[in-house]
Image (spheres, grey):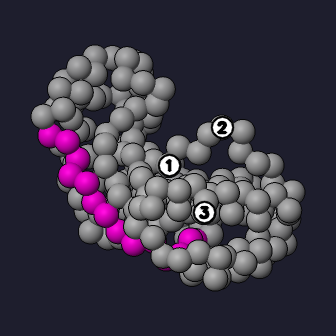
Amino acid sequence: MEKVRSFVAIELPGELKERIDDYQRQLKPLCRHTRWVKANSLHITLKFLGDQEAELIERVQQNLEHIKGAFSPFQITVKEFGAFPGKRSPRVLWLGVISEPLQQLYQLFQFVENDLHGLGFPKEKRRFAPHLTLARVKQSGNFEPLWNFVQRNPFEPFTFKVSEIVLMRSFLKPQGAEYKPLGKFAF
């Protein structure tokens, strides 16, 4: 039986993706040995579901319908360039995400966690750190030019309204993952 690789996320508006694409173009020459995520593929992951049976994904869709009326739309701001685990030996380069009011995004994450836990998905053990993954570092090197550039040219904060989440299917391809929405769930 075919497995469906999927995740629950917040999609980004086109204007934000264009701004990130421009920023990435400026950053790419400053750090080699990285694999950059295409800006049009960026999203805020709330819950990675992995490879699951199609029947379970149908049940996930039914469960996510519970979000209707559970939230009011809220604002998210994308800002601040950073790295996991830190600047000295970065593995992931990212843009940070905050919500207004601040707790809304965390409450949305908890809602999805609790809703899908009832279907057998384990709760995330790591602290929720909302971010947009811009690149994955493949090899250590000198990142000083990157950090100097980012300090002089910070990403200009971008705010947008969140009023839905999406269940996204992921197709792994040699040129990078491709995503297709399986369902959108408005608040």
Residue drawn at point x = 76 percent, y = 48 percent: 123
Element class at badge 3: helix
Q: Nearer the viewer, residue 156 or 178?
A: 156
Position of 131 with respect to 8 (left or right) is left
The span picked out in magenta is 153-166
Residue 160's x, y, as percent? 35, 68
Position of 156 with respect to 57 (left or right) is left
Does 59 appear above or below 83? Answer: below
| Residue 108 tag number | 3
Q: Which numbered disc flags the more N-terminal residue, 1 or 3? A: 3
The answer to the question of whether label 2 and label 1 lie on touching residues, with beta carbons closer than 8 A, is no
Residue highlighted by disc 1: 130
Q: Nearer the viewer, residue 70 or 19?
A: 70
Position of 25 with respect to 140 (left or right) is left
Element class at badge 1: loop
Residue 31's x, y, as percent? 27, 29
Residue depth check, mark 3 versus mark 2: number of the one nearer the observer: 3
Residue 46's x, y, as percent? 59, 57
Mark 3: few, some, or many residues within 10 Å (few <14, many ≥20)?
some
